[in-house]
C-alpha cells in the first residue's frame, strides 16, 4: 500500500466485478486494487485480473480475509452471498461496499447522503434502479412534500445476468424502500422491466412523484441541479425530457448510457452501480489516507 492509497478487494469476478475492476484501475485516486476473489478456478474474470497483474483467487472470501492489508471490499456477487459475508468482513475490520440488494447497511446514494454514512462499516448501494431514480425523488423532496413515488426501470434483457434475475424480488423491495428512506417519499414503489428488444435498449427510468403544493420552477431547478451532480461520476446519466407536470403528479424521465469500459454501453444499469461504487470507495479511501489508517 502506497502512502496515498489503501488496498481494496473485489468479491465476485463476474461482469459487474470485472467492470468495477477496470473502473478502479482507470479512475481511482486513493484505492489500490490488491485482490479479486471468486469461487470458480475457470473464471474469466479472475483470468483478466491476473493478466493485469492483480492477485486473483478462487478460494472466495477466505483468501481476502487472510490479507490483513485490505481495508475496503466491494461485494459484487448476490444478496444471499453478502448476507453471509457481511459479518465476516465487519469482524475483520474491512469496510464493505455492497453492490447487491442485500440491504445490510444503510441505504446510500452518494449525491444525497454519503456524508451521513461515510463511517459505517457496511455501505449499501441499494440497487442500480435506485441509484438512477432516488436522486430525482430526493431533489423533488427538497422543495416539496412527496406523498408517493413510483419508478419504472427498463433495462435491456441482455444486461440482466443470473444475479440480477435471481434478485428481482429484492430489487423491487429494496428500491422502493430506498425511495422512502433516502428519497424521502412517504410511500415508494418500484417496477423493473427486462426488455428483450434488439438492438438492446439503453437503461431508461421513469419517475412519478405525487407532491403537495408544488412550485414548478423550484422543482425543475432542483432536478436539473441533481442531474448535474450525478453526471460528475456517471457521465452517461441524463434527463431525457424536462419534468412533466399534471396536477399533483410530476413525471421525470432519466436515461443512463454506460461508459463501455468492459460492459456494453446499453448496460447503463450495471454501469451506474459500478460508477457509484468507485465514487464511494474513493471517498472512504481518501478519508482513511488522511487519517493514516
Image (spheres, rainbow, N blue to C red):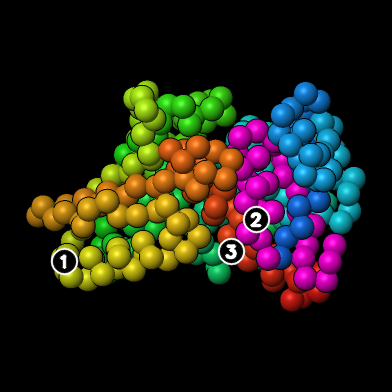
Does 17 appear in magenta?
Answer: yes
Decide which of tag 3 and tag 2 comes sooner along the chain.
Answer: 2
Residue indicated by mark 1:
216
Image coords of residue 147 (percent x, y):
25, 54
Residue 143 vertical placement versus 80 (above, below): below
Dot 2 alpha-carbon crowd within 10 angstroms: few under 14, some 14 to 19, many 20 or more: few
Residue indicated by mark 2:
26
The residue shown at (18%, 61%) is 212
Which quarter of the rendered picture does the N terminus lie within? Answer: bottom right
Decide which of tag 1 and tag 3 comes sooner along the chain.
Answer: 3
Q: Decide if residue 190 is on the left or right side of residue 233.
A: left
The residue shown at (65%, 47%) is 22
Q: Under tag 3, what secondary structure?
A: helix
Q: Decide if residue 224 is on the left or right side of residue 32.
A: left
Q: Nearer the viewer, mark 3 or mark 2?
A: 2
Q: Quadrant of residue 52?
A: top right
Dot 3 alpha-carbon crowd within 10 angstroms: few under 14, some 14 to 19, many 20 or more: some
Q: Decide if residue 29 is on the left or right side of residue 190.
A: right
Q: Quadrant of residue 287?
A: bottom right
Q: CA distance from mark 1 to mark 3?
A: 31 Å
Q: CA distance from mark 1 to mark 2?
A: 40 Å
Image coords of residue 283 (percent x, y):
63, 66
Does 222 appear in magenta?
Answer: no
Between 25 and 195, which is closer to the camera in this rendering?
Answer: 25
Which quarter of the rendered picture does the C terminus lie within? Answer: bottom right
Between 244 and 239, which is closer to the camera in this rendering?
Answer: 239
Q: Mark yes or no: residue 234 visible.
A: yes
Q: Are marks 1 and 2 in contact (CB under 8 Å)?
A: no
Dot 1 alpha-carbon crowd within 10 angstroms: few under 14, some 14 to 19, many 20 or more: some
Q: Which residues are magenta?
A: 1-29
The residue shown at (74%, 36%) is 48
Amino acid at each position: 500500500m502506497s502512502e496515498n492509497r489503501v488496498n481494496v478487494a473485489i468479491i465476485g469476478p463476474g461482469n459487474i466485478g470485472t467492470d468495477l475492476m477496470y473502473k478502479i484501475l482507470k479512475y481511482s485516486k486513493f484505492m489500490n486494487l490488491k485482490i479479486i476473489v471468486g469461487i470458480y478456478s475457470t473464471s474469466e474474470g479472475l483470468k483478466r485480473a491476473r493478466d493485469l497483474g492483480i492477485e486473483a483467487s478462487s478460494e472466495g472470501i477466505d483468501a481476502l480475509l487472510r490479507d490483513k492489508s485490505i481495508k475496503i471490499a466491494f461485494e459484487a456477487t448476490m444478496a444471499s452471498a453478502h448476507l453471509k459475508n457481511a459479518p465476516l468482513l465487519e469482524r475483520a475490520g474491512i469496510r464493505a461496499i455492497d453492490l447487491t440488494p442485500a440491504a445490510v447497511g444503510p441505504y446510500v446514494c452518494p449525491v444525497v447522503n454519503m456524508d451521513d454514512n461515510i463511517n459505517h462499516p457496511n455501505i449499501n448501494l441499494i440497487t442500480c434502479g435506485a441509484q438512477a431514480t432516488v436522486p430525482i425523488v430526493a431533489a423533488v423532496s427538497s422543495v416539496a412534500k412527496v406523498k408517493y413515488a413510483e419508478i419504472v426501470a427498463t433495462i435491456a434483457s441482455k444486461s440482466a445476468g443470473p444475479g440480477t434475475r435471481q434478485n428481482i424480488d429484492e430489487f423491487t423491495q429494496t428500491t422502493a424502500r430506498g425511495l422512502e428512506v433516502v428519497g424521502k417519499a412517504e410511500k415508494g414503489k418500484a417496477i423493473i422491466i427486462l426488455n428483450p428488444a434488439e438492438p438492446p435498449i439503453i437503461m431508461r427510468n421513469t419517475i412519478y412523484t405525487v407532491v403537495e403544493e408544488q412550485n414548478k420552477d423550484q422543482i425543475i431547478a432542483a432536478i436539473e441541479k441533481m442531474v448535474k451532480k450525478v453526471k460528475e461520476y456517471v457521465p452517461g446519466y441524463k434527463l431525457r425530457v424536462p419534468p412533466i407536470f399534471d396536477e399533483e403528479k410530476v413525471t421525470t424521465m432519466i436515461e443512463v448510457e454506460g461508459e463501455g469500459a468492459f460492459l456494453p454501453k446499453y448496460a447503463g444499469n450495471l454501469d451506474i452501480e459500478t460508477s457509484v461504487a468507485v465514487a464511494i470507495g474513493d471517498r472512504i479511501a481518501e478519508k482513511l489516507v488522511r487519517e493514516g489508517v
